[in-house]
Image (cartoon, grey):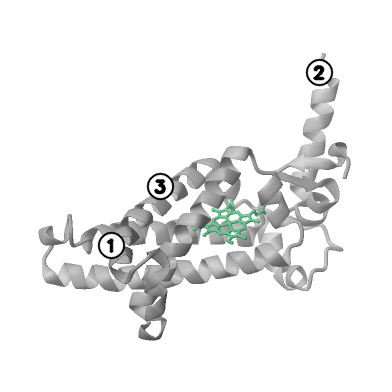
């Protein structure tokens, strides 16, 4: 496709952060699942041995959190819910049926992506806070047993919650054709943004026109 028909959606640093996040998240999530469901205990080998997984899981978990802080700094301002997002919620059925006949005034990210974004961030904070409390090697000794029990429960719930959110995120990324290649190359087509993010499309055009008019 010609370069003039492509629009930069995600910058290099953001893509790098995202895919590094995926690389760190997978072993953390799978090792966590191996301790939660006995039938999945074989996943404990994902980081070499189950013993090694015990040591590395919290360090990689902190890495996941740090990368999410980076993603937050880059994406939070695009994910603030605005008035026009009501239209997306009202028409969620036609969105799910892949019907794009009606303009829904969708900005750079749609209302569903925004809700998912904040839910991911909330789970990340819960996982970090509870994870520090139950980190036996460094912090657990500073907390009484009932607090540790509560933190264990919160950690498990937030972990399962985050994994389910990410499964949904991956499903939607595959379902909306062109979004994964956008996250790989950074670029999406004009037709793609017109179809999926009509308000952002108008903003991009207005921006191009104003730059063209500048001396
Ligand atoms: C194989 C796994 C994954 C795939 C295929 C994937 C795919 C994508 C794609 C295509 C986008 C861009 C969406 C768009 O341009 O509209 C995106 C954005 C994003 N992804 Fe992922 N992702 C994966 C895993 C993850 C994980 C594990 C996390 C966090 C724990 C994550 C967090 C994010 C965030 C925060 C954004 C920005 C979305 C926003 O600002 O609303 N992703 N992902």
Quadrant of the image containing the N terminus: top right
Residue 107 appearing in the image: no
Of badges 1 and 2, the one in the foreground is 1
Element under disc 2: loop
Q: Nearer the viewer, mark 3 or mark 2?
A: 3
| Separation of marks 1 and 2 at Cα, in angstroms | 53 Å
Vertically, is 16 above or below 25? above
Say which label, 1 or 3, has the lower sequence index.
3
Q: Tell me which residue sits at (11%, 58%) in the image.
A: 142
State the image coordinates of residue 145 (x, y, percent, origin top left).
12, 70
Label 1 residue near ligand 1, CB within 8 Å: no
Instruction: Using the image, tell me which numbered label, if any, was put on residue 214.
Output: 2
Residue name at image x 65 percent, y 43 percent: 10
- Local crowd size for mark 1, using a 10 Å CA cut-off: few (<14), some (14–19), many (≥20): many
The vertical placement of 32 against 186, above or below, is below
Q: Is residue 189 above or below residue 31?
A: above
Marks 3/2: CA–CA distance: 40 Å
The front one of 146 and 81 is 146
Q: Number of callouts in the render?
A: 3
Q: Earlier in the sequence, mark 3 or mark 2?
A: 3
Nearer-the-camera pick, 203 or 180: 180
From this view, report whether residue 40 is shown above or below residue 99: below
Label 1 belongs to which residue? 130
x, y percentage for residue 148? 19, 68
């Amino acid at each position: 496709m010609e370069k003039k028909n492509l629009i930069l959606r995600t910058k290099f640093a953001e893509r790098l952060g995202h895919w590094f996040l995926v690389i760190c998240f997978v072993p953390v999530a799978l090792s966590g699942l191996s301790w939660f469901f006995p039938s999945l205990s074989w996943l404990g080998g994902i980081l070499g041995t189950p013993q090694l997984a015990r040591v590395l899981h919290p360090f990689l978990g902190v890495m996941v959190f740090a990368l999410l802080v980076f993603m937050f700094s880059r994406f939070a301002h695009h994910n603030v819910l605005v008035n026009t997002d009501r239209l997306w919620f009202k028409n969620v059925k036609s969105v799910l049926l892949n019907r794009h006949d009606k303009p829904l005034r969708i900005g750079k990210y749609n209302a569903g992506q925004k809700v998912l974004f904040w839910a991911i961030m909330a789970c990340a904070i819960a996982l970090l806070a509870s994870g520090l409390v139950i980190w036996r090697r460094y912090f657990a000794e500073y907390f009484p047993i009932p607090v540790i029990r509560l933190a264990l429960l919160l950690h498990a719930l937030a972990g399962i919650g985050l994994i389910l959110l990410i499964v949904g995120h991956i499903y939607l990324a595959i379902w909306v054709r062109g979004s994964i290649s956008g996250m790989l190359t950074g670029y999406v087509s004009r037709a793609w943004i017109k179809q999926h993010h009509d308000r952002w499309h108008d903003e991009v055009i207005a921006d191009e026109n104003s730059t063209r008019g500048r001396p």
